[in-house]
Image: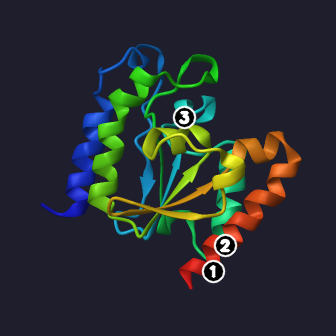
Amino acid sequence: MTRQKELDRLHKEITECEKCPLYISRKNPVPGEGSVTAKLMFVGEAPGAREDETGRPFVGRSGDFLTTLISGIGLSRSEVFITSVLKSRPPKNRTPTRSEIEACRPYLERQIEIINPQIIVLLGGVAVSSIIGPWKMAEAHGKFYKVDKCTYFITYHPAAALRFPTFKDVVKADFEILKQELR
């Protein structure tokens, strides 16, 4: 089976998922999108309202900012893979619960296995703590971490950069570090 077919099959499984109660309130599951051969994978927290409406990841204001950041490192959205830890929107954009994260985590692990990116960019504290454990963002951002067979890069979530202007320059600087690594 080709990698694309494996990913398509996985995404179909995600759209039919009922492993946690979030499937009841969601409009659309948001499995993720992008290249099955992506060198970079971006992992956020969970879909927001716009993502829930469209079924696509990072399509609101923070998505626009992420797209700009990706362009700034010389890539397009179609060349990377973008997803979230959760594949369904938590009500009122609340922080995901541990049980919701655990229900979705196998999907993300399988996406990582299929795509096999060189670098997985963890966007924000929930993505970081869900994948590699609790870290203080102020100390961990802008750095690469090798865990098991994966290389992770940590930065703040684009929504945090929009909400707190001081983080915007920090995120831009982090992406410059990422860009240097890609050369």
As drawn, the label of residue 177 is: 2
Where is mark 3, residue-wise? 47
Where is mark 1, residue-wise? 180
Q: Earlier in the sequence, mark 3 or mark 2?
A: 3
As drawn, the label of residue 146 is: none
Q: Which is closer to the viewer, label 3 or label 2? A: 2
Q: Secondary structure at mark 3?
A: loop
Q: Position of residue 151 (x, y in %)?
A: 44, 64
Q: Which is closer to the viewer, label 3 or label 1? A: 1
Q: Position of residue 35 (x, y in %)?
A: 40, 64
Q: Position of residue 97 (x, y in %)?
A: 49, 21
Residue type highlighted by circle 1: Gln
Left or right of 150, for residue 94: right
Q: Can see residue 173?
A: yes
Q: Are marks 1 and 2 in contact (CB under 8 Å)?
A: yes
What's the CA distance linking mark 3 and mark 2?
A: 26 Å
In the image, is residue 143 above or below residue 23?
A: below
